[in-house]
Amino acid sequence: MTRHFPEDRRAMGLAGAETVFDPSATSRGLSGHLWRLEQPAAAVTGEYFAGAINRVGGEEPDDDDFYGTSHFAGPEARSVGEVASDKETEPVVRDPDPAEPREVRDRRRFHRDPAPGARTPLTAP
């Protein structure tokens, strides 16, 4: 997924994705505040679970300091479990309700009732 482009995220939701993973290697200071906002926003817009994966630690020769904080967000923008460490590598295992994306889609109808012609430019090959 491309984190900063909501069109990709929306297209995946329209195609029926229930979980979308967003692997990243982003350093402190670059976009930590965006990381915490973009994932729940993607989950809401796509009406799916967003799995945000970011590495932890440094890398030579640049001495980048990757901030970790991997997490999952649900289609209602709520966290699924705790946010992972920003210092230590750790597995992030979550058990979300697999019915939630469908229930949210049925209730909101964002994907079912778009404005006429609204999807064509987004989903065209």
Image (cartoon, grey):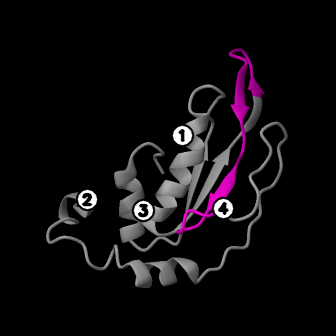
Percent x, y of residue 121: 19, 58
Whole-angstrom CA distance, mark 3 to mark 2, is 14 Å
Which residue is pictured at 36% across the width and 70% down the height?
14
**Residue at 14% across / 68% down in the picture?**
117
The residue labelled by disc 4 is 79
Marks 3 and 1, how far apart at CA: 16 Å
Q: Nearer the viewer, mark 3 or mark 2?
A: 3
What is the tally of numbered marks visible in this picture? Answer: 4
Q: Is residue 37 left or right of residue 80?
A: left
Of label 2 and label 1, which has the lower sequence position?
1
User: Mark 3 near mark 2, Cβ–Cβ under 8 Å?
Assistant: no
Q: Earlier in the sequence, mark 4 or mark 1?
A: 1
Which segment did they paint magenta? 58-78
In the picture of the structure, the residue carrying the numbered disc 1 is 34
Q: Is residue 83 above or below residue 108?
A: above
Q: Residues within 10 Å of mark 1 (few under 14, many from 20)?
A: few
Q: Which residue is mark 3?
A: 45
The residue where tag 2 is placed is 122
State yes or no: residue 75 in magenta. yes
**Cβ atoms at labels 2 and 1 below 8 Å apart:** no
Secondary structure category for the residue under label 4: loop
Q: Quadrant of residue 25?
A: top right
Instruction: Tell me the quadrant of the picture where the C terminus can be found.
Output: bottom left
Identified by mark 1, the residue type is Leu
Locate residue 96, reporting x and y percent.
68, 74
Between 26 and 113, which is closer to the camera in this rendering? 113
State the residue lying farthest toward the top. 61
Q: Is residue 37 magenta?
A: no
